Image (cartoon, rainbow, N blue to C red):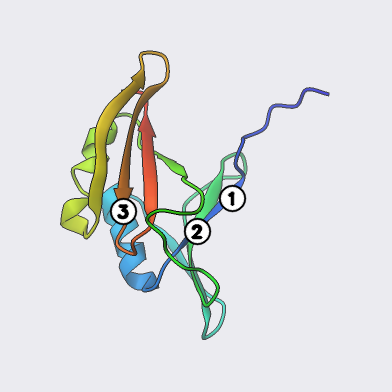
Amino acid sequence: MSTSRNAINWFEIPALDIQRAQKFYEIVLDIELSFLDLGEHHKMALFPSDQDSVSGALVYHDWYKPSDTHGPLIYLNANPDLQEVEDRIVTSGGTVIFPKRQISPDQGYMAVFLDSEGNRVALHSDK
């Protein structure tokens, strides 16, 4: 029973201000998120995806709390070179915690940052 699957199939990043968070990620990752209003206390901004890819959302809801020290650390795809993504973080309202560094020659590069909402998030790229 060997079926190839992604280790992650969905992620949610807490947001205190969903519009601010959406703008931050759209600028930093150079993508467009789809806004979804699920009522007064539940809003989402969906990352782009297709049927065969992992995706997720920024989420505003009472039980989601941004954290810079706890919770899961997700690695967002910053290929081909995460330096281009990292260069947009500070000007978009985030903070770089660990700048780009090599994991290993085979594993590529990583960086960690705080987003506009105070969440600790990581980036990964091949170069």
Above or below, 77 against 104 in this view is: below
Indicate which disc residue 57 carries: 2
Q: Is 61 placed left or right of 105 in the picture?
A: right
Q: Earlier along the polypeptide chain: callout 1 or callout 2?
A: 1
Residue 10, percent from left and from top = 59, 50
Residue 9 point in image, percent of width and height: 62, 45
Estimate the x, y position of residue 47 in percent, counting from the top left. 46, 54
Q: How many angstroms separate mark 1 from mark 3 (CA)?
A: 20 Å
Residue at the spot 30% in from the left edge and 47% down from the top edge: 113
Q: Which quadrant of the view contains residue 104?
A: top left
Q: Which mark is residue 10?
A: 1
Image quadrant containing the C terminus:
top left
Q: Amino acid at mark 1?
A: Trp
Q: Residues within 10 Å of mark 2 (few under 14, many from 20)?
A: many
Residue placed farthest to the left in the image? Answer: 91
Q: Earlier in the sequence, mark 1 or mark 3?
A: 1
Q: Nearer the viewer, residue 105 or 52?
A: 105
The amino acid pointed to by label 3 is Leu
**Mark 2, secondary structure of its residue:** strand
Could you tell me which residue is drawn at 39 percent across and 48 percent down?
121
Q: Is residue 116 or residue 2 the one in the foreground?
A: 116
Q: Single out the mark in the foreground, 1 or 3.
A: 3
- Crowd class of label 1 (few under 14; some 14 to 19; many from 20; radius 10 Å): few
Q: Which residue is mark 3?
A: 114
Q: Residue furthest top?
A: 105
Distance in Å between CA atoms under marks 1 and 2: 8 Å
